[in-house]
Image (cartoon, rainbow, N blue to C red):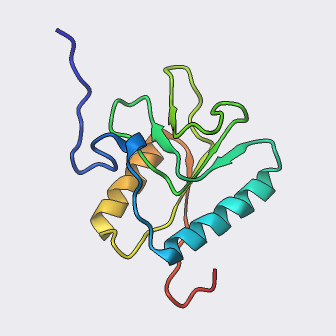
């Protein structure tokens, strides 16, 4: 009998995330797209920058959906919806999280703590209704 990895039902995406499209509020979407574009320009082809990409880390937990994820080039080919990290596959170099007004502080903090434990550099971008994006 094989054991299944522990699944935290309060974790990021507890069911079939590649088939889900999470709604975003317009400000969150604009800020995420602006940050993704800036990251893409900054890494200049040395790394690949993704939006709306689920990450299945090798820790066996649920998928994570960072707002922006940066991977070594050629690891994921579009139109893939996810990065299923193999045992010897690279961890994303960086992820960007943008808290939305629907995120509770405790849930957002747990997500960031898990991301930090998995190893990528974590950037948090805070925007509010007064922010021009």
Residue 32 located left or right of residue 45: left
Q: Residue 102: where, in percent of width, then height?
A: 33, 72
> To which quarter of the image does residue 14 belong?
top left
Q: Residue at x 52, y 77 (%)?
A: 27
Residue 8 located left or right of residue 113: left
In this rendering, is residue 13 above or below 23?
above
- Which of these two is toward me, 102 or 5? 102
Q: Residue 10: where, in percent of width, then height?
A: 23, 51
Q: Residue at x 58, y 65 (%)?
A: 32
> To which quarter of the image does residue 104 belong?
bottom left
- Which of these two is toward me, 131 or 105? 131
In this rendering, is residue 116 above or below 125?
above
Extreme residue toward the right, this view: 44
Extreme residue toward the left, this view: 1
In this rendering, is residue 108 above or below 81?
below
Residue 70 located left or right of residue 56: right
Q: Residue at x 50, y 83 (%)?
A: 128
Quarter of the image where the C terminus is located: bottom right
Extreme residue toward the bottom, this view: 130
Residue 46 located left or right of residue 99: right
Q: Residue 34: where, in percent of width, then height?
A: 66, 68
Q: Report the label total.
A: 0
Quarter of the image where the N terminus is located: top left
Q: Residue 15: where, in percent of width, then height?
A: 28, 41
- Which of these two is toward me, 62 or 121? 62
- Which of these two is toward me, 104 or 118? 104
Q: Residue at x 83, y 50 (%)?
A: 44
């Amino acid at each position: 009998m094989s054991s299944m990895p522990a699944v935290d039902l309060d974790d990021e995406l507890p069911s079939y995330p590649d088939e889900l499209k999470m709604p975003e509020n317009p400000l969150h979407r604009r800020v995420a797209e602006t940050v993704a574009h800036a990251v893409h320009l900054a890494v200049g082809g040395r790394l690949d920058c993704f939006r709306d990409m689920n990450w299945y880390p090798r820790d066996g937990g649920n998928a994570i959906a960072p707002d922006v994820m940066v991977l070594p080039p050629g690891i994921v080919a579009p139109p893939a919806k996810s990065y299923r990290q193999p045992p010897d596959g690279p961890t994303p170099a960086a992820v960007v999280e943008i808290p939305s007004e629907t995120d509770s502080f405790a849930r957002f903090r747990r997500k960031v703590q898990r991301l930090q434990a998995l190893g990528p550099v974590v950037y948090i971008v805070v925007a509010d209704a007064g922010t021009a994006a």
